[in-house]
């Protein structure tokens, strides 16, 4: 007689398979069975109390009593009434609904993993450690069995989405434990629908050293970016929604009374709301822009001399030195003037600010609606640690913003629906591009925010703006 192959577990007989299947079914529906068990126990106890037979052995005796049937019906009515009354309270109703929905989603996920028949999961148990609701659907934390890896489920994400009839499934490996993975089960697209109000719109004041909320990602979660010691490049075709993203960042800077604003407005009207609050305001005048950039470089150099005297390598939150935020809209206008000498001068000054300004507290936010290599040379683009590509006409234009190779990897702003204004790919320093939708600020919102910023700065002596087209004296208040 031939025994089982070495290393292969013996096959269970029919009875064992039936018991195993029954056990798995009971375990899968343990939440619902537990709730039914609680209700049944409450019904039995209620019947016992209606029989008025207390005592340690009274309940078994009551079950054998002929009067049990007479008390069972009113007890059931009483339990049903109490259950209905409890469900009338919203917290109870939502709590029970959440428990049942999580249990149902857990079963659907495990059933989907069985249906797609991954070889690495065959005859192995995947444990659902935790499952929580998100704005877009569900987030499940799974513990994989030995022999499986996050990459196996990542490659099967589309098949899992089909099996569960979902919009999107994404798989992320835990940074500290390879056996743990996070699976996003998205039912809806949070990036569709009406415009999203800015998360800081009602804040009385802001602090730019904190992460600034800029968008909502495709899982419905808030996307915030650090601006301190960073620079941001924003690009996209006309109408893609980049202006609103730039407005939100400018508003965050304006609502911080310790920030100095420097505006380069290629359209003259795009940043006009913030002009009364700015130290520097430049319109569509490249030569004036070159002079202003020279002044900013002088401020930067003076700041470094001051840091040297203080024995510091960079500014910090407690040293009293304000951040300088340089906002450039329509970058193409300032670096494509037709005068090669002037273009080179502005490009070199901008490159210097972006490369050396971080430690000195100079933050550059630049936007362009013509993301091409002649507008944004790679030696300047690569200095921007944060890049945001709204819809672009071609994958090459998308790569001009995000960097070479991202379009081929599946992160192409050319694939964004033209009807989804404000949607783009945000690449923060060292991360994978995130598909997200920028917040929206109407003209009324901008006017209200500018008025609030004016009031905040008026109450902060020594931190108000110097005045448009002026620059600070290199010896004071750097």
Image (cartoon, rainbow, N blue to C red):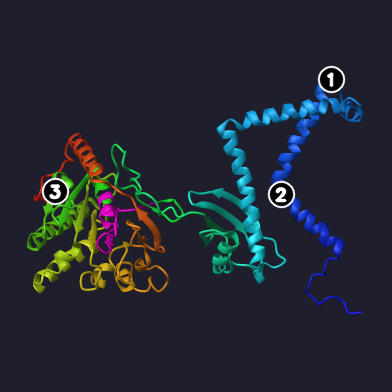
Dot 2 lies on which element? loop
Q: Residue furthest top?
A: 52
Q: Earlier in the sequence, mark 2 or mark 1?
A: 2
Dot 3 lies on which element? loop
Tell me, yes or no, whether the two marked residues, 3 and 1, touch with CB atoms within 8 Å: no
Q: Which residue is mark 3?
A: 279
Q: Which mark is residue 29?
A: 2
Q: Which residue is mark 1?
A: 52
Q: Is residue 423 visible?
A: yes
Which picture quadrant has residue 302?
A: bottom left
Which residue appears at 45% of the width and 55% of the height?
189
The quarter of the image holding the N terminus is bottom right
Q: Position of residue 204 (x, y in %)?
A: 29, 36
Observer-nearest of 240 and 144: 240
* Relative side of 415 to 42, left or right: left
Which residue appears at 11% of the width and 56% of the height?
283
Q: Position of residue 27 (x, y in %)?
A: 73, 51
Disc 2 and disc 1: Cα gap in Å?
Answer: 35 Å
Task: Tell me which segment is drawn in magenta.
Answer: 223-248
Residue depth check, mark 2 versus mark 3: number of the one nearer the observer: 2
Q: Position of residue 48 (x, y in %)?
A: 83, 26
Disc 2 and disc 3: Cα gap in Å?
Answer: 65 Å
Tell me, yes or no, whether the two marked residues, 2 and 1, touch with CB atoms within 8 Å: no
Q: Position of residue 435 (x, y in %)?
A: 40, 60
Count every numbered label the image shows and give the total.
3
* Relative side of 170 to 304, left or right: right
Q: Earlier in the sequence, mark 2 or mark 3?
A: 2
Category of crowding for the residue at label 2, using alpha-carbon neighbours closer than 10 angstroms: few (below 14), some (14–19), many (at least 20): some
């Amino acid at each position: 007689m031939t025994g089982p192959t070495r290393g292969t577990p013996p096959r269970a007989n029919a009875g064992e398979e039936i018991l195993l299947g029954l056990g798995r079914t009971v375990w899968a529906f343990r939440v619902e069975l537990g709730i039914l068990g609680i209700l049944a126990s409450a019904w039995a106890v209620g019947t016992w109390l209606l029989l008025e037979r207390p005592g340690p052995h009274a309940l078994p005796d009551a079950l054998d009593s002929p009067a049990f049937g007479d008390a069972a019906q009113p007890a059931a009515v009483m339990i049903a009434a109490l259950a209905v009354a409890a469900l009338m309270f919203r917290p109870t109703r939502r709590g029970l609904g959440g428990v049942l929905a999580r249990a149902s989603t857990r079963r659907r996920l495990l059933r989907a993993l069985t249906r797609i028949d991954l070889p690495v999961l065959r005859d192995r148990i995947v444990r659902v450690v935790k499952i929580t609701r998100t704005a877009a659907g569900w987030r499940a934390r799974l513990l994989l069995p030995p022999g499986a890896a996050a990459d196996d489920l990542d490659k099967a994400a589309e098949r899992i989405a089909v099996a569960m009839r979902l919009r999107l499934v994404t798989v992320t490996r835990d940074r500290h434990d390879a056996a743990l993975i996070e699976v996003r089960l998205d039912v809806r697209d949070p990036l569709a629908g009406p415009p999203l109000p800015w998360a800081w719109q009602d804040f009385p004041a802001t602090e730019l050293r904190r992460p600034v909320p800029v968008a909502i990602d495709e899982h419905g979660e808030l996307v915030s970016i650090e601006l301190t010691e960073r620079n941001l490049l924003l690009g996209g075709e006309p109408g893609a929604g980049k202006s609103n993203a730039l407005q939100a960042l400018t508003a965050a800077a304006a609502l911080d009374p310790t920030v100095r604003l420097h505006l380069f407005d290629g359209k003259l009207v795009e940043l006009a709301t913030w002009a009364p609050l700015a130290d520097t305001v430049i319109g569509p005048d490249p030569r004036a822009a070159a002079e202003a950039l020279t002044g900013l470089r002088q401020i930067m150099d003076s700041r470094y001399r001051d840091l040297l005297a203080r024995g510091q390598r960079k500014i910090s939150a407690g040293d009293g030195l304000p951040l300088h935020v340089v906002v450039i809209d329509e970058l193409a206008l300032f670096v494509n003037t037709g005068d090669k000498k002037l273009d080179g001068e502005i490009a070199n000054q901008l490159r210097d600010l972006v490369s050396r300004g971080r430690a000195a507290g100079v933050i550059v936010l630049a936007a362009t609606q013509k993301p091409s290599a002649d507008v944004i040379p790679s030696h300047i683009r690569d200095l921007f640690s944060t890049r945001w590509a709204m819809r672009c006409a071609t994958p090459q234009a998308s790569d001009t913003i995000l960097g070479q190779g991202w379009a081929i990897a599946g992160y192409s702003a050319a694939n964004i629906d033209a009807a989804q204004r404000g949607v783009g790919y945000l690449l923060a320093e060292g991360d994978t591009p995130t598909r997200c939708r920028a917040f929206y600020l109407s003209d009324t919102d901008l006017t209200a925010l500018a008025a609030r910023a004016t009031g905040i700065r008026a109450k902060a002596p020594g931190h108000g703006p110097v005045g448009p087209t002026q620059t600070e004296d290199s010896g004071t208040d750097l």
